[in-house]
Amino acid sequence: MTLNYQSTDPLPMSLTAFDLDNIRGILSEPTRYDWFAAVMLRTAQKANQHNMRKIAKEWPDIAAAFLIYHTGTIPESFRDVIPGWESYITMMRPHIFKEH
């Protein structure tokens, strides 16, 4: 499956395949990666569960990528605020965990 960033894509994506492929570096090297999606991923890293739910409502792809990176999936407690969460797992896991 390839990532489709067209406006007709049913999943809103502000992340690119490059972001997903390099999530470890984005989270650990803040001065090297400074674009919006990278800043949002680092913001998610600082968020508590309440604030992560707020992020998930506005930027579901950011929250999904961060949660998948840290837990391997999207936890039950976030599935109600990330529409299409199963599709995010299918799209993102191969990039995040270098399974492609």
Image (spheres, grey):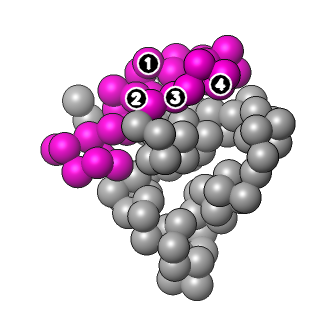
Q: Amino acid at mark 2?
A: Ile
Extreme left residue here? 100
Which residue is denoted by mark 3 in the rendering? 74
- The front one of 14 and 82 is 82
Q: Amino acid at mark 1?
A: Glu
Give the residues in magenta.
Answer: 73-100
The mark found on residue 86 in the picture is 1
Q: Can you see residue 12? A: yes
Q: Can you see residue 17? A: no
- The front one of 61 and 71 is 71
- The front one of 33 and 29 is 29
Spatial distance from mark 3 to mark 2, Cα to Cα? 7 Å
* Residue 89 among those drawn in magenta: yes
Q: Residue at x 16, y 44 (%)?
A: 100
Spatial distance from mark 1 to mark 2, Cα to Cα? 5 Å
Specify few, some or many for label 1: CA neighbours under 10 Å numbering under 14, 14-19, or 20 or more: few
Image: 56 above or below 23: above
Q: In the image, residue 53 lies at what x, y percent?
A: 76, 33
Q: Residue at x 65, y 25 (%)?
A: 78
- Depth-wise, is mark 4 or mark 2 nearer the camera? 4
Q: Amino acid at mark 4?
A: Phe
Image: 56 above or below 8: below
Spatial distance from mark 4 to mark 1, Cα to Cα? 12 Å
Which residue is denoted by mark 2 in the rendering? 89
* Labelled pair 3, 1 in contact (Cβ < 8 Å): no
Label 4: state its secondary structure.
helix
Label 1: state its secondary structure.
helix
* Labelled pair 3, 2 in contact (Cβ < 8 Å): yes
Which residue is denoted by mark 4 in the rendering? 78
